[in-house]
Amino acid sequence: MRQLVCPLCHTPAPEKTKDQGLVKCKNCSLTWLYLLEDVDQVALYQDEIYTVVDNRKSIFEKIIFREAKKVIQTLQKLSTSKIKRCLDFGSGKGQFLLQVKNKGWEGVGVETSGPRASFAKEKYGLQIHDTFYQSGKIEGGNYDAITLFHVLEHLPEPMVLLEKLCLENLNEEGVLAIEVPNLGSWQYKIAGKFWMHLDIPKHLSHWKEDMLINQVENIGFKHLKTQYFSVHLGVLGMLRALMGKTGYKGNIILELKNKKKLSVLIRIALILPLAFFLECLAVAFRKGGVFRVYFRKHESKR
């Protein structure tokens, strides 16, 4: 896959853009990744960083479960009726869907990574579709809630797919939740080009809150709420940003998966309290490392 034009408005990149570099669109202001050379998207997600690790019953799983439960509570509070069906698009290993299932809702996931889809099916007993979505209803559609956690930034045409997905699958009173890295975050200002969530070349677009809200409202939704805090992605991103200031150049996710370097683990333990404090402060100023936005279909579009 190559990306030569803005994934939102299809404006070409400036002529002197690097073969692989970030571009701020002069037309719509989206920051996106210019890819001149062809990138194998399948191979891209088969590297060591995306290797599936069974961390059930670990502190990491407990953190993810706790955050998932809070999102589920928010979805129900914002819904005008009792939620019964939820579609998690880009469901990963299925931790969020497992909490959906435990809530008593019917949960369906879409996950194109074979190992992750298999983990969700085999370990958690979840219903997962592992084919690339282009259009149409998924398991009959008519979902009361649709969630996309860290999916939009991976898509070559994010709003085109989102509009199709919701048009075919979200019911008239349904709630939509989207979470992406926050390009307006403090941790991005601290880390710059070394920010963990740039994740070149996997992340094709980078969002600020106002831009994403405007884009989703343009396809017929009303913004309801924004949340900015995440332990496993927000605090982790701040931790990596601060570690970079001490000379660390590694991949913190990979280090935590492998647990091989004692020196790195010691550095993490020393910096983590400051990272947690700064990220909480950033959240208070709406500058957390990620943001999660909730929407409902606009009344005029129902």
Image: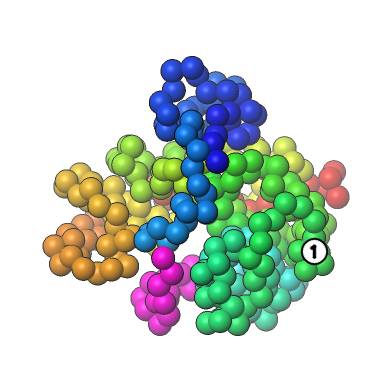
**Residue 209 visible from this viewpoint:** no
- At 51% across and 69% down in the image, what residue appears? 115
Magenta part, dominant SS: helix
Q: Nearer the viewer, residue 246 or 50?
A: 50
Q: Position of residue 247 (x, y in %)?
A: 17, 46
Could you say which quadrant of the image residue 187 lies in? top left
Q: Residue furthest top?
A: 15
Q: Position of residue 110 (x, y in %)?
A: 64, 64
The residue under the point 60% across, 63% down is 111
Compare residues 91 and 279 and report the one nearer the observer: 91
How many residues crowd mark 1 within 10 Å: few (<14), some (14–19), many (20+)? some
In-front residue for pair 139/281:
139
Q: Secondary structure at mark 1?
A: loop
- The amino acid type, in three-letter code, at marker 1 is Gly
The residue positioned farthest toward the left in the image shown? 263
Residues rendered magenta in the picture: 51-71
* On screen, residue 273 above or below 120: above
Task: Give the side of residue 226 with respect to residue 21, left or right.
Answer: right
Q: Mark 1 highlights which residue? A: 141
Query: If the image is split into quadrants, where does the N terminus sit?
Result: top right
